Amino acid sequence: MTNYKLSSNLAISDNGFLFLSTTGETFTVNDIAKVVLMDLKNDINYKSIFDKLLKEYEVEEKILERDLEDFFNQLNVYNLLEEK
Amino acid sequence: MKIAVTGLNNVDNPGPGVPVIRGIKDAKDFKCEIIGLIYDALEPAPYMDDIVKSTYTIPYPSGGLDLLFERIKYIHSKEKLDVIVPTLDSELFGFTKLTPKLDELGIKTFLPSTEQLILRGKDKLASFCNDNDILVPKNILATSAQDIYKVSSEFKFPVAVKGIFYDAKIANNLDEVFSAFKSISSKWGFPVVIQEYIKGEEYNVSALGDGEGKTIGAVAMKKLYITDNGKGWSGVTIYDNKLIELSKNIISKIKWKSGAELEFIKEEKTNKYYLLEMNPRFPAWVYLSVASGQNLPYSLVELALGKKVEPFEKYEVGKLFIRYSWDLITDLKQFENISVNGEMHNG
């Protein structure tokens, strides 16, 4: 995860609406996903995002790890990540 | 300044006339009157507010060039036309052939040559692309049922079966190819193009070439909603440098003169763009290019008038168009005028 960053072609609105300018694809994400994406956009690393979510939400470490990994996999599937 | 425009049939499968006119009228410090040229009395644009000043019927291309020229001469005698912008595929060969005669009348056009029109035709495009290292789906031209038997050995199913001018169907087996071949050839004649099916997303580019190899503008769009007829009913501007550079390369290689729509598919597994078609006129969604910062229709008029036009360098990404339908109410008198007299004058 540490070798990836959010696609520079992805626009994120305050409402959690995503627009990939190279393909015209749009996505909507929930509030937590928006926070993660904004952090990624600001080049905050995976570990810091993980720690922040663990602190802010009532979630077990293992579940968060699994959910975050799943989310990153989805970002990858939709070509929203690019290598650093 | 009077500019005549065709393709005013903005129906469920709209012609590009109305968006072309909107673009021309949006140009700052440019005053003109638009004269509509229509084939059918029920083309909607003449009945719309502030689109055309006057409208005249013209004969279908199948009626022959002499008839068309005589009609234009009559319209010119009444309106003193400066420019004609034909916008429909089916009329372009005719208008291109009439260009010298129109020039003599003092009417300017900005049209591709007959050779260029032939080169981008569905039956010639693949060999042009292969000669110029542009990716294009493999295809065969079928003129008889005998040709269909080649499909099984040369292609994997599904395949796309396309008419020479319009229409396309996806066929999943040989029986479906035969059925599509029969229905398309009966409507649009021969050859029927049988094309490799490339799995991926489709992207379209509206562009304007200056005839010397330069692209004046190119705007890329992704369709967001497609009708049952396969027409884009909404779309959004996108930007991918590869796509725009590829479009410019194609326009440069053909030295395309006029507006065009390039249709690409981005192959899912390789992310490479394949050219599916090159339409020899602006698309019906060309007003999206105007709204995103490239007034291609007006630039075409400027080129027709012999002005120097600097290429556009950018456009706004994320601009959306959504087409809609609207029941326009008008008086029977207007319909009567155009039906009986072949002309109609607004205000």
Image: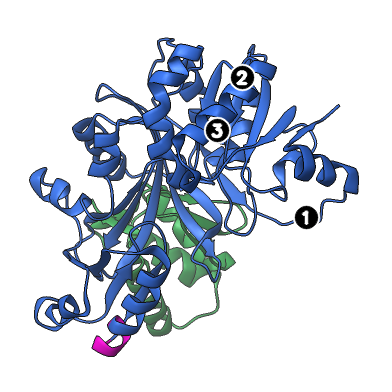
Q: Amino acid at mark 3?
A: Val
Q: Which region of the structure is painted magenta?
A: B173-177
**Circle 3 residues within 10 Å: few <14, some 14–19, many ≥20:** many
Q: Are marks 3 and 1 in contact (CB under 8 Å)?
A: no
- Taking B208 as reference, is B324 left or right? right
Spot occupied by residue B344 in the image (x, y as percentages of width and height)? 78, 34
The chain holding disc 1 is B
Q: Secondary structure at mark 3?
A: helix
Q: Secondary structure at mark 2?
A: helix
The residue wearing badge 3 is: B290
Q: Is residue B304 visible?
A: yes
Among numbered discs 3 and 1, the one appearing first in the sequence: 3
Q: Which chain is green?
A: A
Among numbered discs 3 and 2, the one appearing first in the sequence: 2
Q: Secondary structure at mark 1?
A: loop
Q: Amino acid at mark 1?
A: Trp
The residue wearing badge 1 is: B326
Which disc number belongs to residue B76? Answer: 2
Q: Name which quarter of the figure residue B259 lies in.
A: top left
Spot occupied by residue B171 in the image (x, y as percentages of width and height)? 31, 81
B176 part of magenta stretch? yes
Q: Is disc 3 in the same subunit as disc 2?
A: yes
